[in-house]
Amino acid sequence: QVQLVESGGGLVQPGGSLRLSCAASGMIFSIKTMGWYRQAPGKQRELVATITVGARGSSINYADSVKGRFTLSGDAAKNTVYLEMNNLKPEDTAVYYCSALSIIEKDYWGQGTQVTVSS
C-alpha cells in the first residue's frame, strides 16, 4: 500500500501563488508515476501534472491549461512531490488530489486539498 498526504491548499487572490506538497509513504518503491489531479464543482476530475520515472529517465506531463504557470517537482529524499502554482486564475479553483500509480497499475489517492482563487 501507498499513503499520500497533501498540504498547502488555501485561498489566494487572482495572480497569486501557492505550493502544494504531497508526501508518500509505504510501498514507495512500487510507484512509477506521481502527480496532481483536480476536480472543480460539477466537473470531472482532470489531470494537472504528473511525473513518470522509468529506466530511461523521467518525464513530466502538464495539462495545457496550466503550462507555463504550474511547475511539478520532487524531492526523492523526502518522498515528496510539489506543485508550484503561479499566476493563479479563478478557474483553477478546485479540490486538488495527489495521485500515485504503481508498477502494477494500482491507483492511490490523497484526501484532497482545496484551492480557491478569488478576490
Image (tube, rainbow, N blue to C red):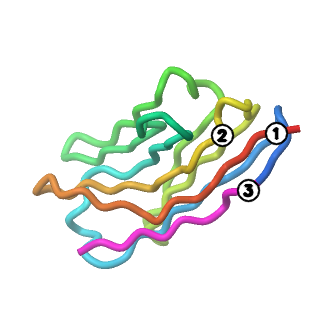
Type of amino acid at the residue the image marks with label 1: Ser
Is disc 3 in contact with disc 1, using a CB cutoff of under 8 Å?
A: no
Is disc 2 in contact with disc 1, using a CB cutoff of under 8 Å?
A: yes
Percent x, y of residue 103 = 15, 56
Q: Secondary structure at mark 2?
A: loop
**Vertical relation: 92 (above or below) 78:** above
**Vertical relation: 80 (above or below) 10:** below
**Left or right: 92, with 63 as reference point:** right
Q: At 63% across and 55% down in the image, what residue appears?
A: 114
Q: Which residue is mark 1?
A: 118
Q: At 18% across and 58% down in the image, what residue appears?
A: 106
Q: Earlier in the sequence, mark 3 or mark 1?
A: 3
**Left or right: 102, with 66 as reference point:** left
Quarter holding residue 52: top left
Type of amino acid at the residue the image marks with label 2: Thr
**The magenta segment:** 1-10
Disc 2 crowd rating (10 Å Cα; few below 14, some 14-19, many 20+) is many
Percent x, y of residue 92 = 64, 35
Q: Earlier in the sequence, mark 2 or mark 1?
A: 2
Type of amino acid at the residue the image marks with label 3: Gly
Disc 3 crowd rating (10 Å Cα; few below 14, some 14-19, many 20+) is some
Q: Secondary structure at mark 1?
A: loop
Q: Main secondary structure of the magenta part?
A: strand
Q: Earlier in the sequence, mark 2 or mark 3?
A: 3
